[in-house]
Image: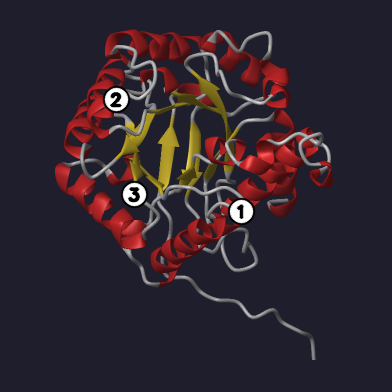
Amino acid sequence: MAFEIPRVKYTGRIREVVIGSGPGAVKVGGADCYPFYRFEGEMPNPPRVAFEVWDSEPQEWQEWAIEPFRDVIGDPVMWAKKCIETYRAELIVLQLKSADPNGDNRPVEEVAEVVKKVSDAIQVPLLVWGTGSDDKDADLLRRIAELSEGKNIAVGPVSDKNYKQIGAMAIGYNQVVMASSPIDVNLAKQLNILLTNLGVNEDKILIDPTTGGLGYGLEYTYSVMERDRMAALTQEDAKLQFPIICNSAPEVWKTREARLTKDDDPRLGDEKKRSVLMEAVTAMTLLVAGADIVVMRHPDSVSLIKDMIGELCA
């Protein structure tokens, strides 16, 4: 008697969300099975990797993280173009670090103009990641949504403190929102309810569950994402059936293990190889947990993850 692999029939499906416009637009989501369980269902849109670009030159990056972008790291437009032309980036996440009220606190208009320049210069979808300050992002992301009319960009993080301001502008200018909650399934669901009640189209929402790096809360993030997917696919929870984005790069590269050199601790080995592997392991773990987009920094890490996605989706 031939062996047959047991198969589970899932009753739910993740919504599809399109980011960007024109031939470079990217569609994510759409799965009706657990991540990479293609023997049980469909994953019509493979997970995507987004390169991060900062709106100002990083001052505390490791030398081995700066190396691939040394010639463009002071110019976000050229940086984004290099990610696309040299490293074949499919998505760009512009991190608005210079707008942070606890940092340079650059004015809204000044930062918004930088975003517009990047958006106008690239043909792949743009995702704009704010400061994490509810008040500053309410003004900043609203203005960016306005200036990016017709581009179908994604803006976030959107929280329960500023969802009305940002959500209303996203509705008016037809942008995607990244709904961010602090590693909690119920809070994620509640924010999605608030956004849809406000009038945000359900095809315009990405979930940001908040991400921990390897050794720094990744297991908790994994557990929450896993429960999110279980509720969406097996319990037909419509308010959790949205694609997930994980802004993992900043979390990985700020860790102690990604910063120490081999001279600091010879037991840890080569610092570049170690950091690249830490980023790749974090990203792959998040993909297995259900991420549809992972944000990454180093081209070598991205190459590893794209190879893995290719093998799993072949």
- Which residue type carries mark 1? Gly
According to the picture, the residue beneath numbered tag 3 turns out to be 181
State the SS at label 2: helix
Q: Is residue 249 left or right of residue 269?
A: left
Name the amino acid type tagged 2.
Leu
Where residue 132 appears, as percent x and y from the top left, is 35, 34
Name the mark on residue 168: none
Is residue 251 visible in this depiction of the protein?
Answer: yes
Camera-side residue: 240 or 134?
134
The disc labelled 3 sits on which kind of residue?
Ser
| Residue 243 percent coordinates (x, y) | 44, 48
At a point 47% along the width and 51% down the height, the residue shown is 30
Work out how far the residue at label 1 is from the one at label 3, CA to CA, in angstroms.
21 Å
Marks 2 and 3, how far apart at CA: 17 Å
Q: In the rendered image, which residue does mark 1 sit on?
A: 215
Q: Which residue is mark 2?
A: 141
